[in-house]
Amino acid sequence: MIARISGLVKAEGAGRGEGIGRRAEGRPGAEERPGGRAPGGTGLRAPAGRKAPVRVGLRAVGGRHNRCETVGVTSRLTVLGSCGAWPEPGRACSGFVLEHGGARVVLDLGYGTLPRLLALLGSPAADGIDAVVITHAHPDHMIDLHGLLRARWFGRRAAPPVPLYAPEPVLARLISLEDDGADVVRRVFDWHPLPAAAQAAGPFRLESMLLPHYLPNSGVRLAGSGLVVAYTGDTGPDPRLAGLGRDADLYIADATDRGQQPGTPAAPPGPAMNLTAGEAGQAAATAGARRLLLCHFWPGNDRQASRATAAAAFSGEILLADEGLEVPLG
């Protein structure tokens, strides 16, 4: 049972060691749920936001992806995790950090992303985050949000809450994971529901839309001065993907390709709830995006094959998400 508590919900009863900051090498060129759709939101109200300090320099953790110099680069996207469903050895699930205009916005925090985020920030208490955006409540996109909550609660309890933009089921799952429940979540995060009307998120105008998936999934479009980044989260094919990524400088797209490997269990029957790489390429082409970043790879997939499939539909630059990959944006 879910009860309203202070504008939140409470669920009652309840590697490889790559570094952060490898530059992108531009080259042309249903999931975890056993079955059935989960219900939508729970009708909660959201509180309102804050601005945090930010570090501009990135730090390498070690290993082969050492930090590259990015002199003159003021905007970048860093990949924290690239896998869908569960992480391959040495990898992590979906997660990104977008830096622009002197601010940092985190996009998703799936399995294994938090240590990489803390290394990038150079702070065990996660100092330097201006906002967090979570697309949906599947654990491969949000489970490390609970670790971030603990880092802030135990490390920076007196700090202002971090703006959190997420569908209501994300909030419910987060509260169910925390022993002290909704009060702690309310004090650490300032929650704004998604999808919603256009709103500010750090230096960005954040637009969001509901896209087809097993749980309510919000595709997001972040537009700042001279920059547009769009992210599908997890989605099946949908005409709205063209509007989400319209003229984007970078379109981050689900490329699960669950059927690429023979013997992979089939997705539940019904409409597709994840994209193939080919469908991601088609979505980027229809949207007129400049660059496409494929992500959310089913573990064990041939990522170069995914790139080739996407390139048959999209003639622009195609990047493959990889832990520590840094994509300069301006």
Image: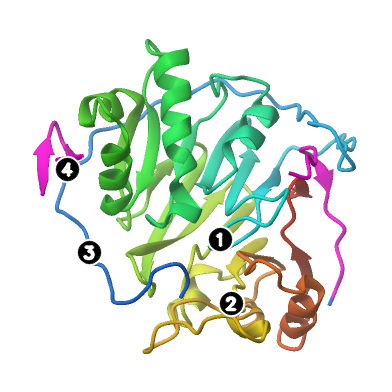
**Which amino acid, mark 4?**
Arg
Mark 3 secondary-structure assignment: loop
Measuring from the top left, give residue 214's x and y in whole percent.
36, 71
3 and 2 marks in contact (CB < 8 Å): no
Q: Is residue 101 visible?
A: no
Residue bearing mark 3:
40
CA–CA distance in space, label 3 to label 2: 27 Å
**Which amino acid, mark 2?**
Ala
CA–CA distance in space, label 1 to label 4: 26 Å
**Which amino acid, mark 3?**
Gly
Q: What label does residue 45 carry, if any?
A: 4
Report the residue at 47% width, 36% height from top.
131
Mark 4 secondary-structure assignment: loop
4 and 3 marks in contact (CB < 8 Å): no
Marks 4 and 2, the one that precedes in the sequence: 4
CA–CA distance in space, label 4 to label 3: 15 Å
Marks 3 and 2, the one that precedes in the sequence: 3
Marks 3 and 1, the one that precedes in the sequence: 3
- Identify the image quadrant of residue 302: bottom right
CA–CA distance in space, label 3 to label 1: 23 Å
Badge 2: residue crowd in 10 Å (few <14, some 14–19, many ≥20): many
Q: What label does residue 230 carry, if any?
A: 1
Q: Is residue 125 visible?
A: yes
